[in-house]
Amino acid sequence: MSALIGTLVGNPRPASRTLNAALALRAALRQVLPSAEDGAVVDAAELAQDVFTPGSTSVKDALASLERSTVLVVASPTYKATYTGLLKAVLDQAPGGWLKGRIAIPLQVAASDKHALAAELHLRPVLVELGAHVPGPAVFLNEAVLADHDALIATLAQHLVDTGTAAVVRAALAAGASG
């Protein structure tokens, strides 16, 4: 089964470094997954004004655009030792079980390595709660490594291999199921 890789980024700043990191992780996934293709990209910063607007459908439409994804990169900068409130507000609008049958790769970016466990302790559980299969450790990136995009892709691809995440995702996709 080929993989369609969607991307959801919860940085309140549009076109952020977190978005670039998420796109690097998507590119790394394409390197380690046969027949992987790019899916929808949702930059939550573009939805911020509608998140709490009654009757607005833009968040639900954005989430619906990700439903075809078999693999979903979910990325956030680290704010107050966890993922952003914007990402939480977007995910709160997803229906229960929204990620059932999908593989999710959590990614958090921070200025300090002291936040390295934030994605594992906070972001991963919310994705699992939504039904996702999270096949390996969450990905943490220190902002210092974001400058060289090509090197970042190579590092992330190697990380996916070294942690066994790539092998587990390939096996799940080959079996035709991700959860």
Image (cartoon, rainbow, N blue to C red):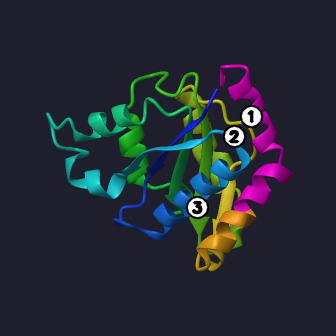
Q: Position of residue 154 (x, y in %)?
A: 72, 65
CB contact under 8 Å: marks 2 and 1:
yes
Number of labels in the image equals 3
Amino acid type for the residue under numbered disc 3: Ala
Report the Cα–Cα distance between label 3 and label 1.
19 Å
Taking the magenta stretch, the answer to whether it contains residue 109 is no
Q: Position of residue 177 (x, y in %)?
A: 66, 20
**Based on the displayed image, in which of its 4 quarters is residue 147 positioned?**
bottom right
- Would you call the spot at circle 3 few (<14 residues within 10 Å), some (14-19), or many (20 or more)? many
**Based on the displayed image, in which of its 4 quarters is residue 63 positioned?**
top left
Q: Is residue 1 left or right of residue 42?
A: right
Of helix, strand and loop, which one carries label 2?
loop
Q: Main secondary structure of the magenta part?
A: helix
Q: Residue at x 28, y 40 (%)?
A: 59
Q: Residue at x 65, y 30 (%)?
A: 133
Select label 3 or label 2 by which is in front. 2
Of helix, strand and loop, which one carries label 3?
helix
Of helix, strand and loop, which one carries label 1?
helix
- Would you call the spot at circle 2 few (<14 residues within 10 Å), some (14-19), or many (20 or more)? few
Q: Is residue 169 visible?
A: yes
Tell me the residue that label 3 is attached to. 24
Badge number at residue 34: 2
For the record, the magenta segment spans: 156-179
